[in-house]
Each structure stands twice: as C-alpha cells, then as structure tokens.
Image: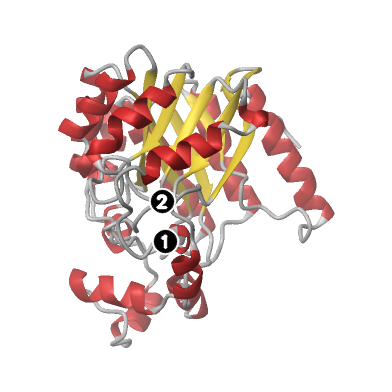
Amino acid sequence: MSTQAQTETQEPISILTSEATSLIDSLEELPSVPREWDAWIQRMRPDFSQHRGSLSLETPSHQLVEFEPVGAGQSLKTLTVFLTNRECPWHCLMCDLWKETAPKSVPSGSIPRQLRHALNDLAAADARHLKLYNAGSLFDAGAIPVSDYGAVASQCRRFDRVIVESHPRLIGKRTVLFQELLGTVELEVAMGLETVHPDALSRLNKGMNLDDFRKATEQLRSRGVRIRAFILVKPPFLTDESEALEWACRTIDFAWAAGVDVVSLIPTRAGNGAMEELARRGLFAPPQWSTVEGAFRHGVESRKGLVLMDLWNLDPDVASDSEKFLVRRLSEMNKSQCWVAP
C-alpha cells in the first residue's frame, strides 16, 4: 500500500450520511458504550436456544468437501469440518455463526471424536487440505480444550495443510503448541480483518483494531504460518456502494501489506437479528453485484496473493437467472484467479 493510502486508511473518516447520523443519535436502543452495544447485539438475536441445546457434541454440526483454488487454474480437494463447541466470546455485529454452537464448553475428548467422525466420510478420503472451522477460534481454550490439541493434531497429519480460525488477539502460545504438534503439516490461520475503516471496525464489536491484526500477522509470519484474512464487502453503516467498494479495496491492500497469503471476500449478509434491525433503519443493505465484482477484480489484479469470493451462502434456488450467471462467473474466476469481463 502506498504511503498516501496508509494515511488515508488511518483517518477517522465518517461512514454515515448526515441523515443516518441523526437517525442513530435519536435511537436510544443503539448504544455507543461497548458493553451496552454488546448486550444490544445479543438481545436482537432470534431464539435458537432449542436448536443449540439439541446439537450433538460427538459429531460436527456439518461438513463438506470442495475443490478450493490454490493458484491460477489449480485447485485441491478440501474437507471442511464445522466443529461444534461453545460460542465465541466476542459478539460481532454481523456474526450469525453462534446459531451452530453449544450453550457451554464441550468436554475434553469431544472435539477429537467429532473430527474422527468427519474423517470417516469416504468422500473425504483423498482430500489434501483440511479446514477446521469452529464458529470462533481454535485457540480459544474455552472452545477447544488444550488437552485435545495432541489428539486433533495427530488426525491432521494425513493432510498437507490445515486451515483453522482464530481471533487476532488469541494468536500466541497455543498457536505455537498446535503448530509444533502438527509436525510437517503446513498450518494456515484464518482471521477476520473485516474492514480497515476505523469507524466501521469499531462498530462491528470485534474487540480488536488494526494494530492487533498487524501484531498477529507478524507473529504468524515469524513462525512460517500461512495467513488468510476474511474481508467484508460492504459492512454495516457503509450504505453507499461506491464508498463500500473503495473501503473493500483499501482493506485488501492492507491485508497484502500485512503479509496475508489468502484474502477471502464475504458479501455481508443479514440473518442474526441485529443486521435485520439495521437494515430496517436504512443502515445496512447487502452489496450490489457490481460492488462484489469490483472488490474481487481489485484483489486478483493486484496479483499479491490468492483471492477467494465466498459463495457458500448464495442460494441458487431463489436467485434470478442473471444472478446465477454472475455466481458461475465468480466461481470460474475463483478457480482461474483472473478477472473475466461479463
């Protein structure tokens, strides 16, 4: 990133129109104090208590096999396992992953048994990469007991690479321990960067800032760990499409400068109660396709790392013909790592 771009990124530019600012100021139920904001986010949630209470602690919530791009025109069979464990201690404004988490911490031995169940799937027999996603952080000791690291790592040794999730502030001694237990298996850590816009990032309730992310990437790079960054395309409060695209591009540039290997672009979605409430008040809307494509184009044409557009949550059954065509284009561009004009 250029010096000018870095300076611009650090400026506390307002992300709200004057009309939206007045709206927020007039709503007492959108608090500005972090602790109250955290409570408001949880209060907006739909009731999933019965579903969460019925989740098995012996099997993952779900799993899938896909061919994930690893370079231009190259992809490898990848098994993704969604482990069932406790909810992440951070309550991000846009997160809906808590729906598939248990009401409390899982007992020791549960996570290795969940992984063993997933690895018994014949469809995953020849997968080369493994994603262990747990709706939070693998290095959260309250989610994945440290005593289970050895049993988990031993099952991972049949793969070439293991990708895990973590909050930037949890990178540390447990990361080093897990990497050492993996032996020769390559470790990749995926972290939510989300956006470099200072106002937007603080409102997401992530409990981190850009310095936290930089420090985490420095630690991981010093250990030879690969880094993946999740970036939101049009996070809440960025209501203008051109502004949303600009900040998505700035965030991608920041990720490359921090040493990230893979950028995963996520079109911001509703689905957790808080986002629906913001949408009702005109403070959030999903990104337009032109914004999604523009962010992807910026990433791939920078040629500094792998760029993946997250297409998991796009429902082809309700999409229009034009949307289905765009999804196919994005899928092909994910594989080729090249921008293809419509």
**Which quarter of the figure has residue 188?**
top left
Q: Does residue 272 appear left or right of residue 174 in this picture? A: right
- Is 245 in front, or is 274? 274
Helix, strand, or loop for circle 1? Answer: helix
Q: Earlier in the sequence, mark 1 or mark 2?
A: 1
Q: Position of residue 159 (x, y in %)?
A: 48, 19
Residue located at (21% from left, 26% from top): 177
- Residue 60, position as x, y percentages in the image: 50, 47
Residue 137's place in the image compared with 119, above or below, is below
* Horizontal and vertical percent position of residue 339: 65, 29
Viewer-proximal residue among 233 and 6? 233
Query: Would residue 256 be visible to someone looking at this image?
Result: no
Q: Which mark is residue 43?
A: none
Pick out the residue farthest to the right.
Answer: 321
For the N terminus, give its image quadrant: top left
What's the distance in space between the residues labelled 1 and 2, CA to CA?
Answer: 7 Å
Q: At x 26% / y 43%, what residue is drawn? A: 145
Task: Give the numbered dot on residue 98.
Answer: 1
Would you identify the image quadrant in which residue 310 lies? top right
Looking at the rendered structure, the secondary structure element under dot 2 is loop
Name the kind of residue labelled 2 in the image.
Answer: Ala
Q: Position of residue 254 (x, y in %)?
A: 33, 35
* CB atoms of marks 1 and 2 within 8 Å: yes
